[in-house]
Image: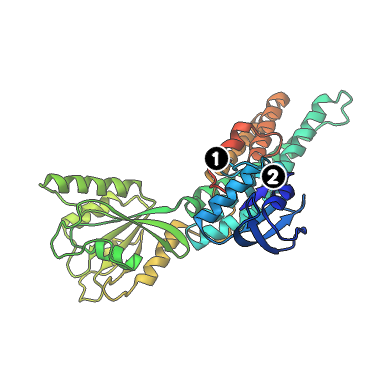
Amino acid sequence: MRISGPDSRAVLSRVFTGRIEPRRVSCGRVIDENGETVDTCTAVFYAAPSSYTGEDMAEIFVHGSYAVAARLMELIENTGLAGRAEPGEFTKRAYLNGKLDLAQAEAVMDVISSSAERSRRAAAAQLEGRLSAVIRALYERAKLLCAQLANAMDDDTGEAELDIGAFACAIRDLGAETNRLAEEGMRSRILREGARVAIIGSPNVGKSSLLNALIMRERSIVTAIPGTTRDTVEENASIEGIPVVFVDTAGIREAEDEVEKIGVERARRESREADLVLWLADGTRALNDEDEAIFRSVEGKNMIAVITKADLETVIAPDEEGRFLDHAAAAVSSLTGEGLGALKKAIAAALLPGDGASDALVTNARHVSALIRASEHLSEAEDSIRIPDAAYYELRSAMDCLASILGVDDPTEELVDSIFANFCMGK
């Protein structure tokens, strides 16, 4: 149980029998109003400002019983000195007391909700303040440019006259760095949100078998009967540390059955909306018109060509007739596991190309949006450099966008409340 605020020590002394010393773990008992034992426990008191929230704070560690926790909460409320916290209230207090900036506060929830290793690493880097340091440096540069331009505008002596060329170059450099971060964020958003990977192909090419092999359990029904999968089947997985939602789809063909038609249409929609498409072809037979039509329908997408049933005698190779030269290709066997490791690496590379996002700093959609807007304002500032008032407005707007990421310069109460409303209780 966590308590924060100026009365934390007083509350702790009423419900806990142990000795209370700052930053020392004490053993004792939780007692009720009559001095009867509710549970044995340990407790820690933190004196402000050396606590998570920056306020006096106490934590009581009881045994994992709902009845004990509920009774302790009741006893704390009965003191009249504390009430139930709102979702995210402890982290909100940490932000308001200057222990964290907004970007770090959001990273707390990202660490908690991370579902894959690279997501966790990115969130941990943000919580440590690496993103904040980069954004703050950009913010300070924008602030300096604003001050220089304002000084030149207010100067009647000519002593503060700007070198227009050098000033425009400084704006351009700042805009380029801001835009680079925004583009990184657009690529790396899947570390926070996860990626949708659609598995498509004609009936009986091994889509369901591949899904089961990738997630290492039987999730989709596998039979020799074409059209067994009639609806999409979704399953979460971590591929090379990246959170992924695999979508097994119905075999795409001209169907007469109404139910199968719906499944085929959903498969087509998934292939259009997915972050990555795995196009499957049966390696034991030559490609037919159906395979070719499906391939052409997704040719402009982020795609990997997967040749299945590699454990059998194959008549098709990943580079047959150069058909797959513009796409990554892999040969796999869902039965033996042959090629699955290489396919997973290809999936990770397709989702996070280049250096990937091993050191990704920007993964939050709110931050990406603010960086895009800041970049646009900086571009406008450069274009209007010979109209000082207009250039100043654009520079100030860019500075405000960067400030909104950190929560400096008096962010709106609506923005702050909307961020912490998404937190879970107790954080």
Residue 278 lies in quadrant: bottom left
Residue drawn at the location 59% of the way across and 53% of the way down = 361
Q: Position of residue 383 (x, y in %)?
A: 64, 31
- Where disc 2 sits, the SS reads helix
Badge 2: residue crowd in 10 Å (few <14, some 14–19, many ≥20): many
Which residue occupies the foreground of this view, 329 or 126? 126
Q: Is residue 353 left or right of residue 302?
A: right
Residue 339 lies in quadrant: bottom left
Q: Is residue 427 left or right of residue 343?
A: right
Q: Which residue is mark 2?
A: 138
Q: Which residue is mark 1?
A: 421
Q: Is residue 48 left or right of residue 383?
A: right
Q: For the residues carrying marks 1 and 2, which lies nearer the camera in this image?
A: 1
308 over 81 or under it: above or below: below
Which residue occupies the foreground of this view, 249 or 351? 249
Q: Position of residue 249 (x, y in %)?
A: 25, 54
First of labels 1, 2 by sequence position: 2
Badge 1: residue crowd in 10 Å (few <14, some 14–19, many ≥20): some
